[in-house]
Amino acid sequence: MTASVDWRPARLRATRDLTPDIRLFEIEPEGPFAPTSPGSHIKLAVDIDGRPDTRSYSVVDACRDGIYRIAVKRLADSHGGSRHMWRLVPGAALSVGMAVNDFPLAAGRPEYLLVAGGIGITPIHAHALALAERGADFRLLYGVRRAADLAFAEELGTLLGPRLQTFVGEAGQRIDLAAEIGRLAPGGELYVCGPLPMLDAARQAWRDAGRPADLLRFETFGRSGRYPTAPFTVRLAGDGRAIEVPPGRSMLEALEAAGVEMISDCRRGECGLCALPILAADGPIDHRDVFFSDAEKAANAKLCTCVSRLAGGTITVDTGERPA
Amino acid sequence: MTETKPFPLNAWYAAAWSHEIGRRLEARTICDRDVVLYRRTDGGVAALEDACWHRLVPLSLGHLDGDNVVCGYHGLAFNGAGRCVHMPAQKTINPSACVKAFPVVEKHRLVWLWPGDPALADPALVPDFLWNDGTDRVGEGGTFYNLKCDYRLVVDNLMDLTHETYVHAGSIGDDSITGAPFEVTHSGRTATITRWMIDIEPPPFWAANLGRPGPVDRWQIIRFEAPSVVVGDVGVAPTGSGAPEGDRSQGVNGWFLAAITPARENSCHYFWNFVRSFKTGDAALTRQIARAHVGDGNGLYEQDAFILERQQEAIDRNPRMPFYNLNIDAGALWARRLIDRMIAEEQPAVSPVAAA
């Protein structure tokens, strides 16, 4: 998954604001075009406060014209990626990595239920276009906090008609996951991309309905939890050092920046490699990963440092480093 | 980066004989894709990418547990759709963990696999191969797995039977073939060569099976269906019995069948059969014909395989040497034209700006 990335030069062709907070970027790679499949993401080289880093963004359509289209939400608690992207102007030179698909769409299922929350619409949008083109039986449920957050809703509405339903939280509209899953044909698949509470609710409803686990597909971005993002302090059990974790940085990034050697891979709460044992915490632990089970999260023995946080206060962890 | 391969991916390719796929893991390489095939408990065939998501160890080295493939290295398990259903030493499963599942259909006693975009895998596009069904026509075929040549060399071979005169002298080869005119026709997905040899002495194989003396009219109607299936309708009938006009009732008719599947660029799997509509109850004749094609090393197809592998070696040694074409290559050139068209059709479109 994190094998070396082949970087290729690209150019930002155009941008378009889909909502006050979501901007569409059209990225044109140089040279032969590597095709994508629905659910693919591309890696972009970004500059975060002067240091190079990478970010992954889902492509929103089939990219048939040789252009990658991604949509990026401007986040108040950005780790720097969205801030970097929103500063770009058309014509900007970019480095783009080969498209990878960790959220592929299966073919030939009797029915599909797509559920998107907020900016989670990006891969789901590509899925919906592909399913519409195939003439597949599917529905798209799209939830947002405010009506102004509905990116793509107009064009999706035109294309999908009644197969699209939107839900605006502010207006008191909620997706009834249990009922929607109940309507799904046997053997049908559920694809979810959205904030963690939505994903947790979907997984719970899916289990409660007795549906097979492998027919629930989801993608996470590890940027939301049960508590608001707040600054907190990590104390290292070994040398007692205290490291501050600001809202715009993950605990893993803060540890790395402080020179603590860490092992990690996915950096979005899936693989569990960066998890550390928790020795003490004086604030609530906000598990934002999908690696630990609910029981493991409740036990609070470890946390995935790439996404999980403390909702304020100090957490003491064992980094595994021992005196020579 | 997207270097064009000499084979289209959005096509059905023969991957195995149906009888070869059972409750064990069978590895194949098809169009540069390593695939593991097995039969599910419901009787259907599953085909997965033969590389574990975790560390890329071939899944075909593992074992079947119900409908799941268990990796022989760390025990990750994948179901027939390629989704991971077990990860060792953790309570959850990484949502990204899956291996590619290839669409598969069983038809005409073969397992056909679609290496390209699964969304385009329409079972109605399986090549016409009904002669292989084992119903009205009998024959026992086989496969040259991993024949060391570009699959298109096999297509060339079958689309130009002039070679019979030289490669298969003494059995089906005959000087009449090189002397007879032929007609080439083509449609969107097929190219057909029709050759009639009127009033000739039948070659030994056909003389024996016709079982009566005298001159014959011999036909070879070779139909190619892109990208790589060839069906040759061949036979003889007594001269004057009306075969060229459509009445073959006095003759004997056979069909050579070939489904050729690229393994890698310079290797292929050659699924072959020879079926006949005469003496269909004669099991000894069936075995004899099969042995005549592939037997002691000097069967008809073994002779072809030998030539084709030596040809590929020569091509590899002479990378800049062009092929020259003869009049007899018209069928092969049409076949390659249709293959090239399929390849071009599946290249991603590039915007005019990007192309500039």
Image (cartoon, rainbow, N blue to C red):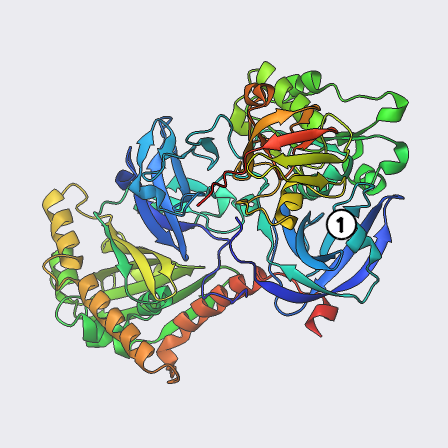
Q: Which residue is located at x 62 percent, y 33 percent? A: A218
Q: Quadrant of residue A121?
A: top right
Depth check, front residue: A186 or B107: A186
Using the rendered image of the protein, determine whether residue B131 is visible from the camera's viewpoint. Answer: no
| Above or below: residue A96 compared with residue B48 | below
Q: Which residue is located at x 56 percent, y 18 percent? A: A295
Q: Whole-percent x and y of residue B278?
A: 20, 48
Task: Count residues near mark 1 (Cα–Cα under 10 Å), then give few for <14, some for 14-19, many for 20+.
Answer: some
Q: Whole-percent x and y of residue B217?
A: 25, 66
Q: Quadrant of residue A67?
A: bottom right
Q: Which residue is located at x 67 percent, y 27 percent? A: A199
| Above or below: residue A89 compared with residue B103 | below
Q: Amino acid at mark 1?
A: Gly
Callout count: 1
A165 on left or right of A242: right
Secondary structure under tag 1 reads loop
| Above or below: residue A233 compared with residue B220 | above
Using the rendered image of the protein, determine whether residue A98 is visible from the camera's viewpoint. Answer: yes
Depth check, front residue: B270 or B37: B37
Q: Which residue is located at x 55 percent, y 45 percent? A: A262
A200 on left or right of B204: right
Depth check, front residue: A144 or A185: A144
Q: Whole-percent x and y of residue B288?
A: 11, 52
Residue bearing the label numbered 1: A80
Which subunit holds the residue at mark 1? A
Q: Whole-percent x and y of residue A323?
A: 47, 43
Depth check, front residue: B20 or A322: A322
